[in-house]
Image (spheres, rainbow, N blue to C red):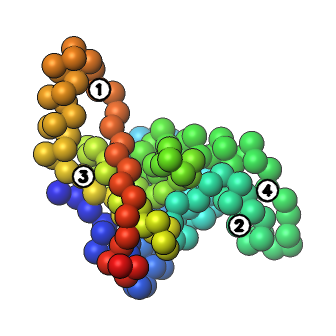
Amino acid sequence: MLTNSRIAYHHHDHKRCITAAMNRARVLCDDRQVRLTPIREAVFKTIWASHRPLGAYDIVDQMTLASSPVKRILPPTVYRSIEFLLEQGLIHRLSSLNAYIGCPFPGNDHNDVFLICRKCGSAAECSAEQLTAAVEHTANRANFKVESQVIEVVGLCPECQ
């Protein structure tokens, strides 16, 4: 089982998370011969700034505040970068929050279960083979072809319980 729950809910050196994610993204993009442009990289780093999902306009606002001199980042620019990052499997979209979070396992074949803390907003990504098998079994019985699967579970993380 793949999971980042051990660190997502606990205080840690998050710079290591960002550095590791950035390194994985660069390698994956090089292998696929796609460009991780400076703006895509900036959007990616903004999403990875914490283990809390961010909406597109939150990303715009954070990038605008971080730019020096302060320069308004345009939403279409961010949306195009988000689309690229989603296509490459570097980030995920959490539908219930209409927000984005970095994928700690890009390039690995996995189905997603997100454990979202309703109090602090942190989210951990997990894969659960048994859950995937149950979804596929149910879909097969209905003669339905599963193309993607994302399950979002809301509750309290260990720190907020």
Q: Which residue is mark 2?
A: 62
Point out the tag, 4 or 3, that comes first from the N-terminus: 4
Q: Nearer the viewer, residue 145 or 89?
A: 145
Q: Nearer the viewer, residue 2 or 27?
A: 2
Q: Label 1's element?
A: loop
**Marks 3,1: beta carbons within 8 A:** no
Point out the tag, 1 or 2, that comes first from the N-terminus: 2
What residue is drawn where x is 14% and y is 37%? 133
Q: Nearer the viewer, residue 30 or 147?
A: 147
Q: Which residue is mark 4?
A: 73
Q: Report the side of 87 relative to 79 (left or right).
A: left
Neighbours of disc 2 within 10 Å: few (<14), some (14-19), many (20+): some
Quarter of the picture containing the C terminus is bottom left
Residue 88 occupies which quadrant of the picture?
top left
Q: Position of residue 80 (x, y in %)?
A: 65, 41
How many numbered marks appear? Answer: 4
Gap between marks 3 and 1 measured at Cα: 16 Å
Q: Which residue is mark 3?
A: 127
Gap between marks 4 and 3 measured at Cα: 34 Å
Residue 61 occupies which quadrant of the picture?
bottom right
Point out the tag, 1 or 4, that comes first from the N-terminus: 4
